[in-house]
Image (cartoon, rainbow, N blue to C red):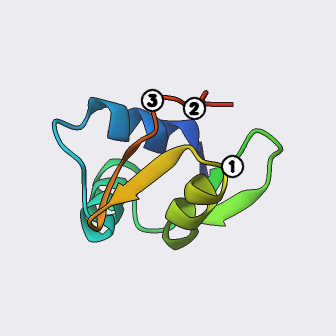
Amino acid sequence: MKTVHIHNVLDMLVEAERPLKEEELIEMIVKNFGEDVYFANCSDRLFQKEEVVRFLLSKNKIVINDGMISFNHAAEKC
């Protein structure tokens, strides 16, 4: 099982030239990290790629406007 820190997803959003649809973000995750990747948060809890958006949204790390996801620049990564 491949595990990547969830901050890597935040980094992808920060580096994106525009907000992304959830499907686009999932495609980027698969392209960069593979299909069967899991993401660990700072407490070592694991998430599947489909759970990442809900978790980051619950922690106010990302915002969704009109169905488009972007990094919440008012939030800290940890």
Report helix, strand or loop for mark 1: strand
The reply to whether residue 37 is in sight is: no
> Could you tell me the amino acid type at mark 2?
Ala
> Could you tell me the amino acid type at mark 1?
Ala
Q: Are marks 3 and 2 in contact (CB under 8 Å)?
A: yes
Residue at 45% in and 44% down: 9
Q: Which mark is residue 75?
A: 2
Q: Please state if 68 lies on the left or on the right of 77 as rendered.
A: left
Residue at 28% in and 30% down: 15
Instruction: Please provide percent x and percent y for residue 58.
Output: 65, 58
Given this view, does label 1 or label 2 mark the residue nearer the observer?
2
Q: Which mark is residue 73?
A: 3
Q: Which mark is residue 51?
A: none
Q: Please state if 44 lies on the left or on the right of 74 as rendered.
A: right
Q: Are marks 3 and 1 in contact (CB under 8 Å)?
A: no
Residue 20 vertical position relative to residue 14 in the rendered view, above or below? below
Task: Report the quarter where the C terminus lies.
Answer: top right
Task: Identify which residue, 32 or 47, lies in the foreground.
Answer: 47
To which quarter of the image does residue 22 belong?
A: bottom left
Q: Determine the CA span between mark 1 and mark 2.
A: 18 Å
Report helix, strand or loop for mark 3: loop
